[in-house]
Image: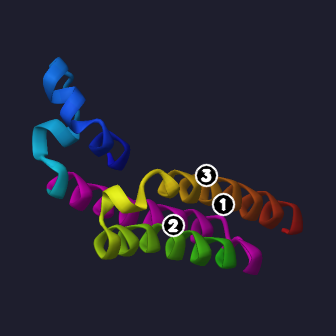
Amino acid sequence: MIYAIFDLDFDRREGIRTVAVALGAKTALRVAAVSHVAAVLLLVAVGWLCHLGFVYWVGCAVVALLLGWSHVDIARRGLRRVGMSFMTVNGVVGLLYGAAAIAAALLA
């Protein structure tokens, strides 16, 4: 949803329907934050249900911190100043979680 905010004016002009167009930028950011909290809760559920070890939990903690930091950074500096750097954070989150999950499975 955060990605869609960058294209908000274009999407409105071209009639493209996105969550950001439908809800507005501020509400889309709130929905993204709720989605990130839900994602972290699901990652925790996976770790708990699969009895994954320390490596997984450290990975989950770092993922949660990075996702949270993205929202703090946007709130502090504004979306335009943060720019696309949050996309890099999302890429790191995906790689980190994948590595932690694979390492935890191999160590189990």
* Residue depicted at 80% across the width and 61% down the height: 105
Relative to 87, does residue 16 appear above or below in the rendering?
above
Report, in whole angstroms, how far the alpha carbon at label 2 lies from the one at label 1.
Answer: 14 Å
Q: Is residue 44 magenta?
A: yes
> Quadrant location of residue 17?
top left
Comparing 77 with 87, the one in front is 77
Q: Secondary structure at mark 2?
A: helix
Q: Which residues are magenta?
A: 27-56
Q: Secondary structure at mark 1?
A: helix
- Tell me if label 3 and label 2 are in contact, CB under 8 Å: no
Q: Residues within 10 Å of mark 3 (few under 14, many from 20)?
A: few
**Amino acid under disc 2:** Ala
Q: Secondary structure at mark 3?
A: helix
What residue is pinned by disc 3? Answer: 91
Q: Is residue 20 magenta?
A: no
**Amino acid under disc 1:** Tyr
Relative to 34, does residue 25 appear above or below in the rendering?
above
Q: Residues within 10 Å of mark 1 (few under 14, many from 20)?
A: many
- Considering every residue shown, the one lying at the far left of the view is 23
Report, in whole angstroms, how far the alpha carbon at label 3 lies from the one at label 1.
Answer: 10 Å
Instruction: List x then y, in percent, for residue 101.
Output: 72, 60
Instruction: List x then y, in percent, for residue 40.
Output: 47, 66
What residue is pinned by disc 2? Answer: 45
Chosen colour scheme = rainbow
The quadrant of the image that shows the C terminus is bottom right
Helix, strand or loop: magenta stretch: helix
Report, in whole angstroms, how far the alpha carbon at label 3 lies from the one at label 2.
Answer: 22 Å
**Amino acid under disc 3:** Gly
* Residue depicted at 69% across the width and 54% down the height: 95
Query: Looking at the rendered structure, which numbered label has been put on residue 97?
Result: 1
Tag in front: 2 or 1: 1
